[in-house]
Amino acid sequence: MTFAGAVGPGHRVAVAAALVRHSPVLDVGAGSCLLEARVGAEYVAVDIAPQVLQPGRNRVVADLLHLPVRSGTFGTVTCISSLQYVVDVEGALEEVRRVTRRGGQLLLLVPNLAFVRNRLKLARGRIPWCSPADTWRGGTVRYFTLADLQPVLERSGWKIVGVHCSGRLRRMRRRFPSVLGADLLFDLERV
């Protein structure tokens, strides 16, 4: 499995795209729809913010907790760097499970609070921001660690197939994602 172009702008999307196994694909929190050109499958983009959703076919403005699609419609759902902006994480995971067919896939990428660099920031009394959208007026509402998110995923009806990281040295980081991964990319299967 290669992650060509998996460093630099869009590197998280490139790593996720290489893991897509089923179609059609629902890209939740799609924004500029970077995944669309990489998946080579039927693609539907959902975002809560119409101003960031790239124009095109199969675009839906919706909230992650209320996806306006039939149950069991999608083979793969991606949620790349979106879950940290959701207050009701378990509700979001249940809604994504609802729209994913049995045996389908969820590719879920979240920032890792336990990443060694974030631990150092916390030790210095600083909050590790997760994206440029983070400000004192908004942004990240949830921080994740592998140990905290794993049982939530399993309770929500997802089986962990693998945990990946993006960025440089991702193969080494994958050995110890809980401390070496700046982000955690969960490859999940709906049970």
Image (cartoon, rainbow, N blue to C red):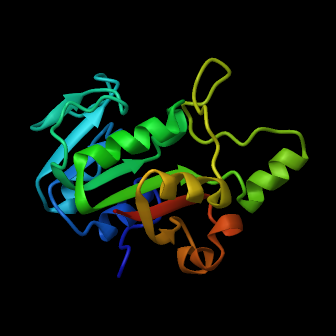
Q: Residue 38, image x and y in percent?
A: 23, 60
Q: Residue at x 9, y 37 (%)?
A: 57
Considering only vertical position in the picture, is 101 above or below 88? below
Q: Residue 125, image x and y in percent?
A: 88, 39
Considering only vertical position in the picture, is 167 above or below 49? below
Query: Depth check: 138 or 10 in front?
Result: 138
Query: Depth check: 98 or 144 in front?
Result: 98
9 vs 133, left or right, is: left
Q: Residue 122, image x and y in percent?
A: 83, 46
49 vs 138, left or right, is: left
Considering only vertical position in the picture, is 142 above or below 24? above
Task: Give the quadrant of the N terminus.
Answer: bottom left
Q: Residue 15, image x and y in percent?
A: 40, 66
Query: Depth check: 150 or 157 in front?
Result: 157
176 vs 92, left or right, is: right
- Can you tell which quarter of the image residue 130 is in? top right
